[in-house]
Every structure is written in structure tokens, then in C-alpha cells.
Image (cartoon, rainbow, N blue to C red):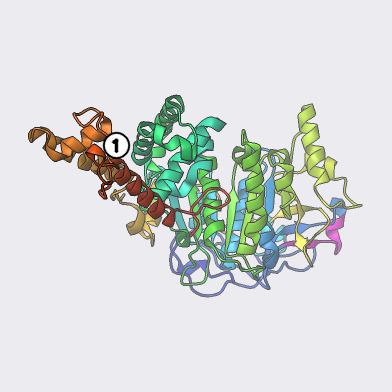
């Protein structure tokens, strides 16, 4: 499925032609030496992606360097029909995790599978540019039985802050109270108040799109707390005030740029270009790492949206989307037990939606055991064991693999060089393969970041820029509540200017402040006459409230496992 690079620009663009078969000489890029034919000294040439597989690298069955001279080499593949059984890429800093992530992302893209990945250091952006046949890449390709063939991939850049990619936005209503409470670090009581705010807004058809809408709803709940108590529970001014203060903290972290419209359409993460390559959506996350809770909650919200919106597909021949969570420990740090249980549930169930979830972190211990058990495809780069905790991590990592009698897994983890990893992929009926020490194949795209000019050029050709670059501010809870206040104030102003009048008398009767106060109950005519058929002011108010509640319940919003709106 690889394609001839010489006809393409150095960034994403039209792709034509076929790449040379493995073992043949690749065409040289301008100004570079012609690569030599692959001597392939360690067994037959590796098969490129095809037949529903992604080539990850080549192993030598756990034996010594001398084994490479024989026929003991084995190509390690990720099977596409098992790729939605999720995966894990771990290893210490500088051991090659980002390159492995790029190799996997490129493989999925070639297979027509869209990818979403966070780019913590900016290095992953190079996947949009044509790779360069550098000596160490050509040599590594030969070691794994390939001819190095440069390629580039269709990329859409995203950025929650709208600086290095198209803005990603979500409405507050879509995120829901559960993730928002975690984002703000609320306690149980404050989270309860936030749930009341969302329930009231959902029932009354008040869209909470951005932070000003949420502030307006909090003010509304605080002002009407006494009328809400019997239905929803106590709402204290202290809890509302604490939530308002946390909203200010969120604003200072730039979250106000994330909440709003146009909200991200999941379909725009699942594009395939005209040559059949899956689009790689790259989230610029270097600045986002300064707000780790926002990063974690955004990724969990995105996972929740995929779960709620996508239909059940069972076990497809290849995933509909693959999702890479870099710095995965941030998703679980300080997360309450209830949230961890829901994340585990989503990870377990989203497989049947055709979504593969791959966690990338330094240490397997960063992932809760209940989630770790769901991750079938594993790549483990080197770990260092300088402290007791490090030694525990090495032992834990070794124990997660299917043992190989020819390999001391715990020892090898500490000996792996850069670009080497222990690999165990699901095979057959979903059984993990025995762990093997593997040379990871080189990426075909550029290793390293794009320049500012190159990134701008990719964004200028983007198919979604016209959709997301300009913000939208439509009528929502803030404007609707303002209109309510104005409508309530208008009769009072008219009554005041009219010297009270009929409306003033009605208000006096409701408040018990006018001359009507102290009169006989209005259900009975004065002087003991027959009962009046006219409704009292109180009855009018009660009936109006009943109608409002009934209407609100009719349009109440259903929410899913992580609190996002069900479609």
C-alpha cells in the first residue's frame, strides 16, 4: 500500500503510484544518494502492511546476536481485526516511544484507519512531511528486512487554544457534570450542586454552551435555591461560590477558549483522504500540558463522545478509529474511584464500536489494573531500575507479558537500546503472542517537528479550517436568563409608573404586602356567599409551575456513562 514519494510535495498532498516491493531499491529524494538494494542478511524480506496487518518490527526470538545469522528472525505484526482490543506503549524518556507511536499511526493510516494522537513535544507533526533516507533509517530498514521508502501522510492539526492547529471546542452541556467536576476539583457536595445546575438546564431547555452560560445558571440556582430544595436537595451559597471561584481558575488556564461553539464533530476525526489513507489528527499538546486536568478531561470527554455517538459494529476487519492517549497517567491521577470505574467500563465497551484505544506512558504502573487488563497489544521500551519503585515497575511490566522461555523479560527490559522494545501482539483468536525482543521498524514520514511555515501550509490546505476557525456565539442560557429577568421586570416597571394598578394589586396579594393582605380566603366570597370560580393568584402560579415542570421533563436530556449527552 506504500506509494512513490517522488511525485509528492514534502507535506500532505495527492498520492499516486506504487512503492517498490520490499528488497528493491527505493527512488532517491532530490540531493540524496541512491539507496542500495536491501542485502537482507537476516532472513527473507519483511512483508509491508497488507493482508490486514501492520508491520511493527523484527524480532530474533530472544536469542543472541549470533541468532541473526540464521533463520530465526520473526516479523512482528499488529493484526488490524484485533487492533480494537486496545494497546499500551510504555518506556522511559528517550527510549523511542514517540517513534513507535509514529510507526503505528502511519501503519493505521496506510490501512485506511483514521488516527487521533496527542503530540506532547511537537515531534509527531513530522508525519505530515516526506521522510528522509538518512543512513541510520536505511540501516534500520535493512535490519528489519525492508527497503526504506519515504512517505507522507494526511494530517489535520488541532489545538484547544487555537494556536498551532484548528480550535477544538466543546459545549459545557456536552461535557457534562461528572468530567467538569473533576476538571474543577470539586468535592462531593459541590459536585452535587453542579448536577442540580445541569439537571435544571437540561429540563428547562437552557443550553450551557460556554462558561458565561454556566455562571448565569449558577446565579439562577443560587437565587431560586429555596424553591429547588424540595425537588433537588439543598443548594448552599457557599457551594455555588466555590464553583464560581473554580470557574475563574479554569478561565485563567485558557479553558474559556475550549468551551463554546462550533463544537467538534466526531466525524471530522474519522476522515479518509482520496487515496485511501486514514487522516491522522494531531493534537498540539505542548502548551496543554500546563493544564493537565484540562488535558485529561478533554481526552476523556472525547472518548465519551465516541462511545455515545458511534453505533455498535462488533469486531470489524479494521478499526473505525484509533485513539492514542499520550501521558496517560494524567487521566488517572487523583481521579475518584467512581470515575475510574466508568473509564474502565468505556474502555471495555468501546471496542464493539470499532474504536481502538492505545495508552502511552512511561510506566505500566501509571495505568490502573482494571484498565491495564483491557490492553491486548503491547510495546515495552526500556525501563531503568535505580530505585525500589523502579524495580517494582520493571517486575510489574515483565509480568504483564506472556512468558518466553528463551527470554528473561525483566532483565531485557533494562537492557533494551533506543529503538528496541519488547513486543507482544494479539494473534489468532485474540491470544497474546509470546513476548519478543524487537527492532522497531523506521517511520516513513519525517522524524521530528515541522517548521512553523510547514505547519501553516498544512493548515491552509485543511478540509476543516472553514468549519472551526471562527467562533460562534448563539443564544444560550446567559441570554435566555437575561430575557427572563427583563420580562419579569417589565410588568413591575409598568405597575410602578401606573401607580400600582391591577398588576400591582396581584403582586401585593402574592407578597402579602398590599391592602389585600389579611382579607378572607379568596376561595370563599365575602360575607359567606358561594365560592368564587375564579382561580387565586397562588393557584395560577402553581399551575404555571406544573406546566413548566411537565414541559421540561418532556425535553430532559439523557446523559451517558461519563456524563456526555446521548445522541
Q: Which residue is mark 1?
A: 521
At 75% from the left edge and 50% from the top edge, which residue is drawn?
Answer: 373
- The residue shown at (32%, 44%) is 539
- Residue 390, given in percent of the width and then of the height, sits at 76, 32
Q: Can residue 224 be seen?
A: yes
Nearest the eye: 184 or 190: 190
Quarter holding the N terminus is bottom right
The answer to if 27 sits in the magenta stretch is no
What residue span does the magenta drawing correspond to?
Answer: 67-77
Please, what secondary structure does the residue beneath circle 1 have? loop
Examine the rendered structure and indicate whether residue 6 appears above or below residue 366. below
Viewer-closest of 447 and 254: 254
- In terms of image quadrants, where is residue 243? top left
Outermost residue on the top side: it is: 238
Whether residue 289 appears in this view of the structure is: no
Q: Quadrant of residue 509?
A: top left
Magenta stretch encompasses residue 75: yes
The image shows residue 563 at horizontal and vertical percentages of 53, 48
Residue found at the far right of this picture: 405
x and y percent of residue 546 in the render? Answer: 38, 49
**Image coordinates for residue 386, horizontal then vertical, percent:** 77, 28
Q: Is residue 53 above or below residue 530?
A: below
The foreground one among 448 and 203 is 203
For residue 278, side relative to residue 532 (left or right): right
Q: How many marks?
A: 1
Image side of residue 468 versus residue 234, left or right: left
Q: Is residue 426 left or right of residue 22?
A: right
Amino acid at each position: 500500500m506504500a506509494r512513490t514519494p517522488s511525485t509528492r510535495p514534502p507535506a500532505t498532498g495527492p498520492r499516486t503510484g506504487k512503492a517498490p516491493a520490499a528488497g528493491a531499491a527505493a527512488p532517491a529524494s532530490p540531493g540524496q544518494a541512491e539507496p542500495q538494494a536491501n542485502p537482507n542478511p537476516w532472513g527473507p524480506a519483511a512483508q509491508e502492511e497488507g493482508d490486514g496487518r501492520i508491520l511493527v518490527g523484527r524480532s530474533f526470538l530472544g536469542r543472541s546476536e549470533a541468532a541473526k545469522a540464521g533463520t530465526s528472525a520473526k516479523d512482528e505484526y499488529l493484526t488490524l481485526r484485533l487492533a480494537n482490543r486496545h494497546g499500551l506503549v510504555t518506556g522511559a524518556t528517550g527510549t523511542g516511544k514517540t517513534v513507535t507511536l509514529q510507526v503505528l499511526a502511519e501503519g493505521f493510516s496506510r490501512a485506511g484507519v483514521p488516527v487521533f494522537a496527542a503530540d506532547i513535544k511537537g515531534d509527531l507533526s513530522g508525519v505530515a512531511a516526506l521522510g528522509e533516507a538518512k543512513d541510520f533509517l536505511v540501516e534500520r530498514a535493512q535490519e528489519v528486512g525492508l527497503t526504506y521508502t519515504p512517505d507522507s501522510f494526511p494530517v489535520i492539526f488541532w489545538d484547544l487554544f487555537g494556536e498551532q492547529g484548528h480550535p477544538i471546542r466543546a459545549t459545557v452541556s456536552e461535557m457534562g457534570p461528572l468530567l467538569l467536576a473533576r476538571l474543577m476539583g470539586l468535592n462531593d457536595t459541590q459536585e452535587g450542586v453542579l448536577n442540580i445546575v445541569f439537571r435544571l438546564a437540561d429540563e428547562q431547555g437552557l443550553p450551557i454552551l460556554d462558561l458565561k452560560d454556566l455562571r448565569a445558571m449558577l446565579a439562577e440556582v443560587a437565587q431560586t435555591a429555596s424553591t429547588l430544595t424540595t425537588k433537588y436537595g439543598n443548594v448552599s451559597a457557599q457551594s455555588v461560590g466555590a464553583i464560581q471561584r473554580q470557574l475563574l481558575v479554569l478561565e485563567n488556564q485558557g479553558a474559556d477558549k475550549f468551551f463554546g461553539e462550533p463544537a467538534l464533530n466526531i466525524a471530522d476525526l474519522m476522515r479518509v483522504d482520496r487515496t485511501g489513507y486514514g487522516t491522522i489528527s494531531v493534537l498540539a499538546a505542548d502548551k496543554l500540558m500546563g493544564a493537565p486536568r484540562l488535558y485529561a478531561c478533554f481526552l476523556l470527554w472525547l472518548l465519551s463522545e465516541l462511545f455515545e455517538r458511534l453505533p455498535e459494529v462488533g469486531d470489524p476487519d479494521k478499526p473505525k478509529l484509533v485513539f492514542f492517549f499520550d501521558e496517560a497517567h494524567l487521566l488517572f491521577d487523583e481521579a475518584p474511584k467512581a470515575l475510574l470505574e466508568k473509564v474502565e467500563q468505556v474502555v471495555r465497551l468501546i471496542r464493539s464500536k470499532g474504536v481502538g484505544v492505545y495508552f502511552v506512558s512511561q510506566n505500566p504502573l501509571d495505568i490502573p489494573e482494571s484498565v491495564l487488563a483491557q490492553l491486548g497489544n503491547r510495546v515495552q521500551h526500556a525501563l531503568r531500575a535505580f530505585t525500589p519503585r523502579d524495580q517494582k515497575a520493571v517486575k510489574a511490566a515483565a509480568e504483564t507479558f506472556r512468558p518466553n522461555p528463551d527470554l528473561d523479560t525483566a532483565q531485557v527490559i533494562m537492557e533494551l537500546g533506543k529503538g528496541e522494545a519488547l513486543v507482544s501482539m494479539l494473534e489468532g483468536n485474540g491470544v497474546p503472542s509470546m513476548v519478543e525482543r524487537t527492532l522497531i521498524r523506521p517511520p516513513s514520514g519525517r522524524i521530528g517537528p515541522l517548521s512553523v511555515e510547514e505547519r501553516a501550509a498544512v493548515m491552509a490546505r485543511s478540509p476543516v479550517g472553514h468549519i472551526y476557525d471562527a467562533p460562534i456565539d448563539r443564544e444560550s442560557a446567559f441570554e435566555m436568563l437575561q430575557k427572563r429577568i427583563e420580562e419579569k421586570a417589565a410588568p413591575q416597571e409598568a405597575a410602578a409608573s401606573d401607580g400600582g394598578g391591577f398588576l400591582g394589586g396581584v403582586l401585593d396579594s402574592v407578597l402579602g404586602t398590599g391592602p389585600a393582605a389579611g382579607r378572607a380566603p379568596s376561595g370563599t366570597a365575602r360575607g359567606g356567599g358561594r365560592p368564587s370560580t375564579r382561580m387565586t393568584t397562588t393557584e395560577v402560579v402553581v399551575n404555571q409551575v406544573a406546566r413548566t415542570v411537565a414541559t421540561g421533563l418532556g425535553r430532559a436530556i439523557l446523559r451517558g456513562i461519563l456524563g456526555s449527552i446521548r445522541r
